[in-house]
Amino acid sequence: MNPATLTAAVGCLPLLAEQFAPYIEEACAAFGIGTDVRLAAFLAQIGHESGSFRYTEELASGEAYEGRADLGNTQPGDGKRYRGHGLIQITGRANHVAVRNALANYGCPDFEAEPEALTQPRWAALSAGWYWQSHGCNELADEGDFERITRKINGGMNGYEDRMKRWNKASAVLGVGRAPVETRTPIPTQPEKPMLPLIPIFAALLPTLIEAVPKLGTLFGSGSEVSTRNVKAAEMVFDVAQKALGATNAQEVAQRVQADPAAAQIVRQAVADNWFTLTEAGGGGIEGARKADVAFVSSGGRVWHSPSFWAMCLLLPLVYMIVGAMTGLWGTLKLTPEVTASIITGIVTLIIGGAGGYYFGSATSANKPAPAPTQ
């Protein structure tokens, strides 16, 4: 298996082909993937599962696998710790133990104690070869039963159209003598790996997008968790990026901005063009607006070009007009001096206090940190 052939068959980056080619060759020799028919099906499946070798760890958090006794996840935190690893996404504590035992003669690490070791190119490839052989996929490939191979690997038919396209491509590159199979989308069945809810997917992919577009860090704050109030903003960020790149989904967005500097630049520009809309969606009122204003100025914008600056300028004349009306400058209102003073004080405090809170923060008890608990 040479890197050029691997690049052509899988559609991966040449650098990744250089890294994985020797270990895929080792896996094929070790687990009976010895014909072009078997190899084409194998490359199609691992290419889909790993995003053309970009990912050897499942992007989702793994929370969906928590408590899954059928995967051997019996301890708290097992779902996240034993989420998919390797080119074929070995999932669950029990499968990590099984692949450790199967690869013991190769001097592998203890994947139960170090599940992340399965992300290394050699173990990622060998674990995929073991899973392939142990689930009878060589024989299914001989029969041309790509659908059953997909069910063995996925538990259902998720991503079948992409897998089929990859199979046709790999078969053509390897010269497999069969007519290309028309791609189709079968009736979905219940997958072994449950479909993840929308929000955990964004939570898993958002750090990759923030790394490519650092400006987003000011919108979501530090860390990779997406809080409830930022859910809408996360959805909008990926929608903006997806439209800018013409991508089909959020995962493709993350893959492309990570691998292609030009794609990252396109997304950065799209985020800049939609910055205030994104901030309004997830910033949380005054706090979000303040973050947007700081980001606007720190990115080179002049203060007097800021929308918030002009909004405040437009509010201040309102103060003068109200004060003038209440004091008789624009006419006479029949109010007692006490009522007049109270109204003026309330209105001025509301507007000026709002401006101060926007630009300088607030020292009210609602915004103070909670006192440390006493021992």
Image (cartoon, helix red, strand yellow):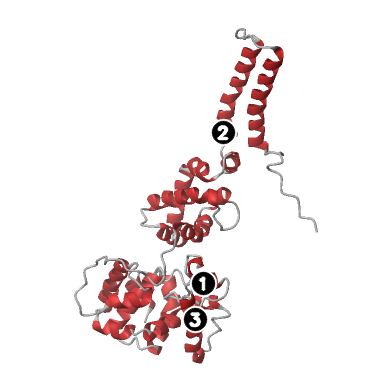
Give left or right: position of 231 versus 26.
right
Q: Which of the two discs, 2 and 3, labels the residue nearer the N terminus?
A: 3
| Number of other residues with Cα within 10 Å of mark 3, as a class: few under 14, some 14 to 19, many 20 or more | some
Question: Quarter of the image holding residue 40?
Answer: bottom left
Check the picture and name the quadrant holding the C terminus.
Answer: bottom right
Q: Residue furthest bottom?
A: 105
Q: In the image, residue 327 lies at what x, y percent?
A: 66, 12
Residue 94's mark?
3
Q: Residue furthest right?
A: 375
- In this view of the protein, which residue sits in the foreground, 174 or 278? 278
Element under label 1? loop
Q: In the image, residue 241 lies at what x, y percent?
A: 43, 51
Q: Amino acid at mark 1?
A: Gly
* CA–CA distance in space, label 2 to label 3: 56 Å
Q: Nearer the viewer, mark 2 or mark 1?
A: 1
Q: In the image, residue 80 lies at what x, y percent?
A: 53, 69
Q: In the image, residue 308 lies at what x, y percent?
A: 56, 33
Element under label 3? helix
Give left or right: position of 146 versus 128.
left
Q: Amino acid at mark 2?
A: Ser
- In this view of the protein, which residue sits in the foreground, 219 or 191? 191
Q: Amino acid at mark 3?
A: Ala
Residue 67's mark?
1
Instruction: Give the residue number, with chain letter if any, for mark 2.
Output: 308
* CA–CA distance in space, label 2 to label 1: 49 Å
Residue drawn at the location 24% of the way across and 83% of the way down: 143
